[in-house]
Amino acid sequence: MKNIPLLYFVFSLGWIFFSEMLINQLEITAKLYEILQTGKGLLFVGFTTFLIYIIIKKHEALKTLEEKEQELSSLINAMPDFVCFKDGEGRWVRVNQFGKDLYHLNHINYYGKTDAELAEVSPFFKDAFLYCIQSDKEAWQINGTSRCEESFHVPSGELKTFDVIKVPLFFSNGERKGLVTIGRDITQQKNAETMLLQKEKLSVVGELAAGIAHEIRNPLTSIKGFVQLMKESDNSSTNRYDIILSELDRINQIVGEMLVLSKPQSVIHKSFNINDMIKYVVNLTSHEALMYNVQLEVRDKVQDTYIKGDINQLIQVFINILKNSIDAMPKGGRILFTAEKLNGNVEFKIEDTGVGIPEERLERIGEPFFTLKEKGMGLGLTVSNKIIHEHKGSMEIESEVGIGTTVTVKIPVYQEEK
């Protein structure tokens, strides 16, 4: 057996060392050399070589498959879309990292669970999971790719909207194999569409406001001229004429501000004392409150505090809010007007005991032409919102039917530049 070519031994040894699946290579090498020395023949060497070749090929194929799977898994997890795989019975098999973060499944064993079971495990998303059951059913019935929009709230309070594509998979015999769901977050797109619609409405409002403003200014000019003549001829009640002229000037100012909706106007903001503004607003609205049997209570907790802006515009905002509160209490009631300094802002809070606003209508408050008043045009809060945002502030409205409404306006305190 010493005549057996050394080439066969080296060839076999090379295959053994080349295989990553064989661990104890030294033992196998010694065993093979022993077999060769005992004369079991060249056939055994060939068979062993062929067997090792098959093992290596299978190992290479398996390794390639694992690499492909890892690449695909990495790609799916890196996607900014929701990707989920379910089996033919609707049980979750795999979901990408975006989906885990979205539904807070990072610490939940979702594998093998249906949407109904996940709804019990994660109660916050119960409605979303239950809706998936219905949309999955429709996808199976269509027997092809389906597309729909799904919206639900996330724990942060934001309403998320997804463009969802569902692809059902079948075996060759027609039985259900699995369902692939891909959801793209289109929340920003939907918000942009909503804002575009708002701008279109505001464009119409602007054209309307421009026409109204020009029509109102003409009679105002005539009235103001005649009041000035009456003031010069009658010296007994000059104070009353001053008030009338002051209010006419303010009406003219408000009419001019309506043009803001049709084209931007340069407004020079100046610092002013909040107490002066509150006193002016209360003086103008207290008479109307008295007529409707509404008690207007003021709690002014800010002294010698200044904000920077246009005092006439902000007076318009608070008069509009107070008038809405008075209108919401036709049989009388109470309004609490509070002003206090909190976290670098002046917080104005107007609370009434009116009829309140239904939740479905509260979401639309502030939209152009949307109003709860029979004779209103729905422009008051639209203009008010614009003015407050121009003053770098914010406005929030909370309401409960039968209890009342609270409007909170926050405007930054003026810090004098040094």
Image (spheres, rainbow, N blue to C red):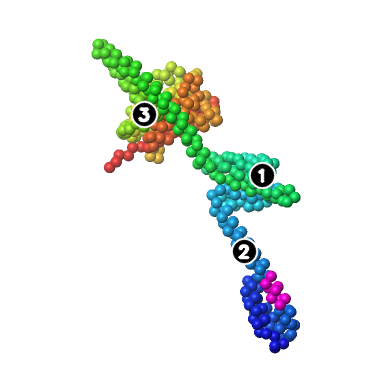
- The residue that label 1 is drawn on is 144
Which is closer to the viewer, label 2 or label 3? 2
Q: Which comes sooner in the sequence, label 1 or label 2?
A: 2
**Pointer 1 with pointer 2, Cβ within 8 A:** no
Q: Which comes sooner in the sequence, label 1 or label 3?
A: 1
Q: Nearer the viewer, residue 229 or 118?
A: 229
Q: Residue at x 39, y 31 (%)?
A: 387
The Cα atoms of the two marked residues, 1 and 3, are separated by 58 Å
- The residue that label 3 is drawn on is 313
Residue type at mark 2 is: Thr
**Pointer 1 with pointer 3, Cβ within 8 A:** no
Q: Which residues are magenta?
A: 46-54
Q: Report if residue 394 lies within the magenta region.
A: no
Looking at the image, residue 70 lies above or below residue 230: below
Looking at the image, residue 98 lies above or below residue 71: above
Q: Residue at x 54, y 28 (%)?
A: 358
Secondary structure of the residue carrying tag 1 is: loop
> Within 10 angstroms of label 3, few (less than 14), some, or many (20 or more) residues?
some
Q: Nearer the viewer, residue 189 or 101?
A: 189
> Within 10 angstroms of label 1, few (less than 14), some, or many (20 or more) residues?
few
Place of residue 50 in the rendered image (x, y in percent of width and height, measured from the top left): 70, 74
Residue 64 bears which disc, if any?
Answer: 2
Residue type at mark 1 is: Gly
Q: Report if residue 52 lies within the magenta region.
A: yes
Place of residue 53 in the rendered image (x, y in percent of width and height, measured from the top left): 67, 72
Residue type at mark 3 is: Gln
Looking at the image, residue 22 lies above or below residue 232: below
The Cα atoms of the two marked residues, 2 and 3, are separated by 70 Å
Which is closer to the viewer, label 1 or label 2? 1
